[in-house]
Image: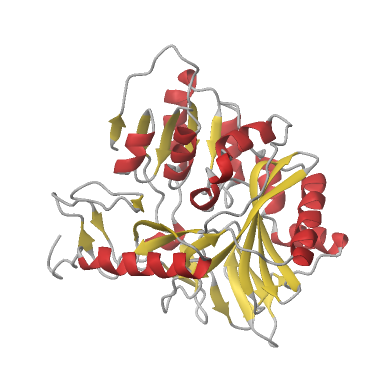
Amino acid sequence: MPIAWRSSLSTEAHPALAVALSARPLAAAAHRAGARVIALDLFADEDTAELATLARGISASAPLTLPSLRDGPLPLPQGERGRCLAFDGAALLEAVEEHRGRASGLIYGAGFEHEPALLEMLGSRIAILGNRAEVVGAVKDPRGFAALLARLGVPHPETRLAAPADGNWLAKRVGGSGGGHITCASAGAIAAGFYVQRQIAGRAVSALFVGDGRRARVLGHSEQWTSPTAEMPFRYGGCVGPVQLGAKIEAMIDELCQELVAALGLVGLNSLDLLLDGERFHVLEVNPRPGATLDVFDGRDGLSLWDAHIAGVAGRLVSFHDRMGRPRAAAVIYAPARLRIPLSFAWPDWTADRGRAGTLIESGEPVCTVMATAATPAEAREIVDMRARRLLERLPPLPLAST
């Protein structure tokens, strides 16, 4: 369990605990805001340690299972574990207990949507600076959230607990994130802990917004893409923003965010994922915590997303004047084969989530995040794709017999 100190703790204001599967985006946002964090995540990456007062790696849980299309639950194969990353709950609770006395509160990212009970246990030990566990549970209850959208008159994919024989359906893990948990569903019952949604075509977009429990303020729109494999056709690939969706659609999304905040009591940073088809959209889900677009929007026009989150949790909305600015893209790069980070490897400055020298990365697991800023969203994405290819050329796969 690696621990990396940047400097000793001082008598200044206590740092916050930043807890996520990867806490680096939170640590980076805090660093830009002049705040201090103790980062707890699965990786304790090199740059997380540089950005945080303390970066500590927390062990992951045992591999989870995915539904097979025909034969019931299917164990996750070696090398595909990146699709269902999760904390070892006992290890995380122990780490939080150890550090809570020196922390002002806990800000969380991805890693709790499927297990709000773990977040509730953390909340009994330290102040949660974000949405409460019961809010996360309500947002990630597939049928309950679909019922809320229906009451609000919001288009959304039909959601069920078993796949009908007609149409195309997707099986999704309750509270899943990252897209690797999504598979095509055949008719009939599916594995426990999963549900099905009717598959709908459209452009995948997201609205980043901050809530104060009553009102919302949209901070920007982004577009997402996938990095598919045969086993994970909807695995998250990256995002680019800001993007323009058109005045009419953006006004409708803004109104919807207001309604969702008022109905659910959302606070701090959240995101709304949609499928856009012309001037029509379908809502997929709300992510009730800071997410991947921290890398895209933080610092734009002087906006600190860390400060916006803290203000929203305290019941205040930050002022923000959206002047668009140059688009920024951030893409997750996955290992095409088993590889190891060389001892003398020099990470380019356009990378983030930089693993430590000697780290073994299995096929299909994330290697790092690649970023680029350009004149247009399309150009920014082209640059991150090019940079990803260049980076992987410098990280050749290990021989099959290597350990």
Residue 332 pos. (x, y %)? 41, 60
Q: Is residue 378 above or below residue 220?
A: below
In the image shown, does 177 or 325 lie closer to the viewer?
A: 325
Residue at 79% x, 42% y is: 215
Q: Is residue 241 above or below residue 313?
A: below
Residue 121 pos. (x, y %)? 58, 34
In the image shown, does 340 or 71 lie closer to the viewer?
A: 340
In the image shown, does 134 or 313 lie closer to the viewer?
A: 313
The quadrant where residue 169 appears: bottom right
| 154 sits left or right of 77 in the view | right
Q: Is residue 136 visible?
A: yes
| 236 sits left or right of 134 in the view | left
Residue at 16% x, 54% y is: 342
In the image shown, does 172 or 358 lie closer to the viewer?
A: 358
How many marks overall? 0
Residue at 70% x, 82% y is: 164
Residue 353 pos. (x, y %)? 35, 49
Residue placed furthest toward the bottom:
166
Residue placed furthest toward the top:
11
- In which quadrant is the C terminus drawn? bottom left
